[in-house]
Amino acid sequence: MIRNRIDVITLGCSKNLVDSEKLMKRLEALGYTVCHNPDNVSGEIVVINTCGFIGDAKEESVNMILEVCEQKAHRHVRKVYVMGCLSERFFQELNDEIPEVDRYFGKFNWNELVEEVRLLRKADGPASDGQTSEQSLRFQRVITTPSHYAYVKIGEGCNRLCAYCAIPIITGHHVSRPMEEILDEVRWLTNQGVKEIQLIAQDLTYYGLDLYHKRSIAELTEKMADIRGVEWLRLHYAYPTGFPFDLLRVMRERPNVCNYLDIALQHISNPVLKRMRRHITSQETYNLLATLRREVPGIFLRTTLMVGFPGETDDDFEQLKTFVRHARFERMGAFAYSEEEGTYAAEHYADDVPDDVKQQRLNELMAVQQEIAGEVSHSMIGKTIRVIIDRQEGDYYIGRTEYDSPEVDPEVLIEKNGNKLTAGQFYNVLVTDADEFDLYAKTI
């Protein structure tokens, strides 16, 4: 056990990561050394920021809690605190079933966690009192990503109430952050050397409706693009219904707004979309994609699709495969439906698609996409592209294009060949080869 050290473990999405990074800065202000996702848990205090979105994520969070509590039982850890989505949703159940945790916190009250640690620190003896003003720490955080990119969360919660989704149960209604506060945060990040902003929210396209009574994502994006030091600005998690088309002009006109959009569509069959409560039709979806590609030439689209939703027939699934072949998404993920307690689907529909059918459909759908992804990658051979370097790995520098979000999208493997490239810098490279997942390139 290393005294005066706190290990913070983040599970789940990039929105959780932002919370962890801001928490870590506040814990550092108390005088602790703070480590993120350590290879070996060895701090005297461990904070687990949990995910509670789907079954696999919940299981991963519970297993991590049990693992760290085992370390505590052997006196390798002094205190264990749990926060985040899982404890927000199952606060009492976790208290009852895993009482070895010293204290549970929800997703939104982690300032209470800071106060708990401050009092513990004070009881241990003279140290920083942690009374650094909240105003001075407003935008500060420990950047745990490579120093050239960071995630910026512009809102919390969701108003969509899709039948399968537990997010509104966990996070509540959508709450937008004030625009000037977000812009100040981006300025702070660029002053730290961040060049690439990953804009995130559960639903970017809803931004501003609660504060400004209009969809304001286009205005926010344009103002962010004007900030000196923002080289790339990438948009994650748009929603198709009520899409703000003025955003497309900003994407088309601003060279530092990446021609990339992450927009989860979930399905294409009208009966399934209706049961999902997506408030959009098949034809409206096809029309939306046509508009996106027409208004932003060369845009790369990432989507997420679901198979096995209650009532999904063989015909529904065939429509989905036809849709994927037609849409030719440059980036796509898919998952099988899993029932989440408390959701509309869990309360109103029988989970009637057998697990083996779900898995078979998932495999078929991803096989279709794999062929498309390979064709997209091979179409890049012979082209000169701009990349940002993330790291070195073996005989390659690993970079990404404006069409690639960190960790989920393809990478560009650049031969070293005696060249010295620097992480966080941009280079033009020539694509020499490709597979379904990555590009291979050499410096020009």
Image (cartoon, helix red, strand yellow):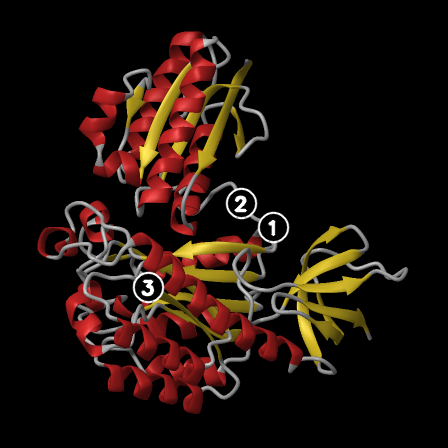
Whether 48 is drawn above or below 160: the answer is above
Q: Are marks 3 and 1 in contact (CB under 8 Å)?
A: no
Check disc 1 and give the amino acid type.
Ser
Which quadrant is home to the N terminus?
top right
Q: Are marks 3 and 2 in contact (CB under 8 Å)?
A: no
Res 315 → quadrant: bottom left
As drawn, the label of residue 147 is 1
Check disc 2 and give the amino acid type.
Ile
User: How far is mark 3 from mark 1, CA to CA?
Assistant: 34 Å
Q: Are marks 1 and 2 in contact (CB under 8 Å)?
A: yes
Q: Secondary structure at mark 1?
A: loop
Whether 20 is drawn above or below 407: the answer is above
Check disc 3 and give the amino acid type.
Met
Q: Does residue 220 appear left or right of residue 402 in this picture? A: left
Whether 93 is drawn above or below 10: the answer is above
Mark 3 or 1, nearer chain start: 1
- Name the residue carrying label 3: 306
Nearer to us in this view, 179 or 196: 196
As drawn, the label of residue 254 is none
Q: Does residue 249 appear left or right of residue 397 in this picture? A: left
Mark 3 or 2, nearer chain start: 2
Q: Residue furthest right?
A: 418
Res 170 → quadrant: top left
Q: Secondary structure at mark 2?
A: loop
Query: In front of the other: label 3 or label 2?
Result: 3
User: How far is mark 3 from mark 2, CA to CA?
Assistant: 33 Å
Q: Residue at x 29, y 41 (%)?
A: 85
- Name the residue carrying label 2: 143
**Looking at the picture, how far across and down is residue 234, in whole percent?**
48, 67
The answer to whether residue 154 is seen in the rendering is no
User: How far is mark 1 from mark 2, CA to CA?
Assistant: 7 Å
**Looking at the picture, how far across and down is residue 12, in whole percent?**
40, 45
